[in-house]
Amino acid sequence: MIDLVYWAPVMVGGALAGASSGALGTFIVGMRIPFLGVCVAHAALAGAVFGSLFGLGGQFLLLPAIGGALLAAFALGMANPERVSLDNNILLSFLFSASMGLAFLGIGLHGILGRSDNDVRSLLWGSLNFCRWEDVWMMGLACVVLVAFVALFFKELRAILFSRMEAQAVGIRVGLVWTLFLGITAVTLTVNFQTVGGLMIYSLMSNPAMAAFQLTRGCGRVLFLSAVLGLVSGLGGFVIAAVTDLPSGAVIVLLSSGLVGCAALVRRFRADRFFC
Amino acid sequence: MLTGSVIDLRAVTVHADRRCLLDVDCLCVEQGGIVGLMGPNGAGKTTLLRVCLGLVKHAQGQIVVLNENVRELRGASLALLRRRIGYVPQLLPARSELPLTVREVVAIGRTARVGLFTRLTRRDWEIVDQWIERLGLKSLCDRPFGAVSGGEQRKTIIARAMVQEPELLLLDEPTANLDLGWREKIVEAIDQIYTQTRISVVLVCHELEVLPPSCRRVALLESGRLVSDGPPEQVFTETRVTELYGTGLRPWHEAGRHALVPGGHRDD
């Protein structure tokens, strides 16, 4: 049996990480930039590494990590793909390599200066099993900010998802809305990374959205279903792992991947292609 | 209140990669008018529409659209001008990953209109549904945009432009890649929109057949320059057609419709 009192923050953390990452994934996969997760993770790592070099440690490392992630997000948001004649994914690969280079430079400097970089590594590659209530509060706060933002800018985000150029031509403030969204994405992902780990967040961001795209239509329904599937993956994966005594992160990732496969099969065999 | 022209371009030039894309001395579109903007590939037709929308940052000259000097506008004020213009682009959005419905795509036109921090009201959705009905899209409104035909997608984008309640409609090759049947349906829809609303329209097209009967003015661009401007019969003479497309085609004008048909002058 699962000790509910002990594991409650882990279960709530998994559910929150799943739901928020699933909701974010609707927009990130919709814009065809799932690589954003990896890019933000390494930008956050670079920020944390240099924060550590300047003497920060423990939970305080989250601040420079968020700073690094925000820098990468704003750089991507302000670079209009049409004006720079480069696709978002190409810009992401540039930001990814630059932030990875900075992170490794910082890690190298730790060695040269004889300092430990353990805090930095644990910040980025956290584990769900060590999630505590203080982490859950942080994730909950990020979740509330995300929900408020999506509620405020839902119709603009829907238009941008359809076509950034179309949205700009009809008079939507694409640069403003998209940059704000990327900023909130960076903060949410960084908070989730340090609690539940990079690989799990990456899969929770991509897989529920991919499954939802197969099963339903309409931005609102996809967003809701993606958040629900993310929650199911995060919470359900942990429960299955606890019952079967398997590693929770791996089970969560595999459960979310399995949902994509099931959704693809369901869509394949349905005549009208969509549930609702 | 608008006075005279909805578009007033003077000495407008656009250069890119040391190449002149557009060099227009003077082009005015009067309020409530419909103008066909024609010319061969690379003539600068799409660039001209994008200049009017403020999408070409390095354009030079005087660009006045809906009484606003486009070159002086930035950020929010440029967005406000674009909300007054319905734009149907040449290329339809690449297949979106997100399965947005036809109704949601049409509603994008209201999104900018109502502005930030405001939800679409019942009145906005009524306008969306009215245009869906007017353009014969009612049976498709809950289907994903990516799952309907090219012609239906074009109509959806035209409906998206019209729900903005624009003062100026810019149509960039609205019949591109459509079969003859769909081309005629779109021409009919444009003609209907113009005669019923008297909105100012600029219609970019390659083929004379796409000009609706209500269009009595054609501006012809060639290598970025405006080479002729007037009624289709006067612009597309046999001599002009031979200059533009070589021998073997001649213009045909009847009952407000126009076409190029085989059988032009022979050089020999």
Image (cartoon, coloured by chain):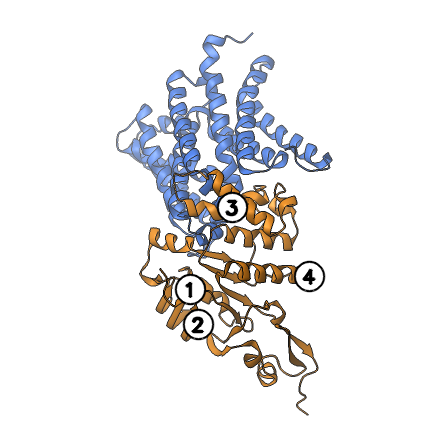
Chain colours: A blue, B orange
Side of A141 where B251 appears, left or right = right
Please, what is the three-letter code of the amino acid marked with disc 1? Answer: Val
How far apart marks 1 and 4 lie (CA) works out to 30 Å
Please, what is the three-letter code of the amino acid marked with disc 4? Answer: Asp
In the picture of the structure, the residue carrying the numbered disc 4 is B179
In the picture of the structure, the residue carrying the numbered disc 3 is B127
- Mark 2 crowdedness (10 Å alpha carbons): few <14, some 14-19, many ≥20: many
- Mark 3 crowdedness (10 Å alpha carbons): few <14, some 14-19, many ≥20: some
Q: Residue at x 29, y 33 (%)?
A: A53
Mark number for residue B51? 1
Report which quarter residue B5 is drawn in. bottom left
**For residue A159, above or below residue A222:** below
Element on which disc 3 rests: helix
How far apart marks 1 and 2 lie (CA) works out to 10 Å
Do marks 2 and 3 share a subunit? yes
Do marks 1 and 2 share a subunit? yes
In the picture of the structure, the residue carrying the numbered disc 2 is B22
